[in-house]
Amino acid sequence: MRTYESIFIVHPEVVGDDQTAIIDKYKTILSDQGAEVLKVENWGVRTLAYQVKKQSKGCYVLFIFDAEPTVIAEFERRMRIDEMVIKFQTVVLENGYQAPAVAEPEAESADEADADEAAEAAQEKAVKTEAPAEAAQEKAVKTEAPAEAETDDAETTEKA
């Protein structure tokens, strides 16, 4: 048996129970043909890159399953017949399907520690950005003071 990944786009007007019924229908087709469904994901309604069958949106559904090559022919034939499926593609996963690993509790505590370190770094960065702003204000005050002194000198030379 080979592992296959099939993505198909369901008509955007099919929602709720009808959409679930279509997904269950294709699960049943695969099961009846002797395939083992490993994963089903409903990605929801998304905008298509270009119009397909006069539709600019569609509901994406992902199937990952183990099956014989003959099962694919029947699966795709049924999708071609179904008017609610506007596009589909099935590919072979050469390395098979590996389910994502479940996160360990220790990893979560490490993530919390990283988050704390990131918060401290952000706070230090904020303090550093405040310091140059204060220095710039002090510099501006110093540059104003000599200008006033020059004005006083100019008045004294005019009087003389």
Image (cartoon, rainbow, N blue to C red):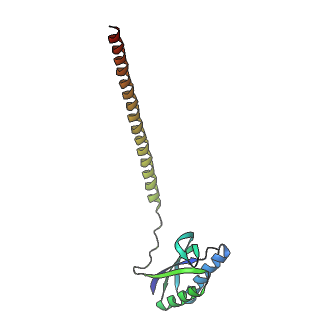
Question: Which residue is farthest right?
Answer: 17
> Where on the picture, by quarter, is residue 96?
bottom left
Image point 47% across, 63% down: which residue? 103
Question: Which residue is farthest top?
Answer: 160
The answer, for residue 124, to whether it is visible in the render is yes
Image coordinates of residue 137 in percent, x first then y, are 40, 29
Q: Tag count in the figure?
A: 0
Image coordinates of residue 124 in percent, x first then y, are 40, 41
Image coordinates of residue 14 in percent, x first then y, are 64, 75
> If the image is split into quadrants, where does the N terminus sit?
bottom left
Image coordinates of residue 23 in percent, x first then y, are 60, 79
The answer, for residue 40, to whether it is visible in the render is no
> If the image is split into quadrants, where does the C terminus sit?
top left
Image point 48% across, 82% down: which residue? 90
Near-viewer residue (80 or 53): 53
Left or right: where does residue 87 sit relative to residue 98? right
> Where on the picture, by quarter, is residue 83?
bottom right
Left or right: where does residue 52 sit relative to residue 115? right
Image point 58% across, 83% down: which residue? 26
Whether 31 is drawn above or below 155: the answer is: below
Near-viewer residue (135 or 31): 135
Image point 64% across, 74% down: which residue? 13
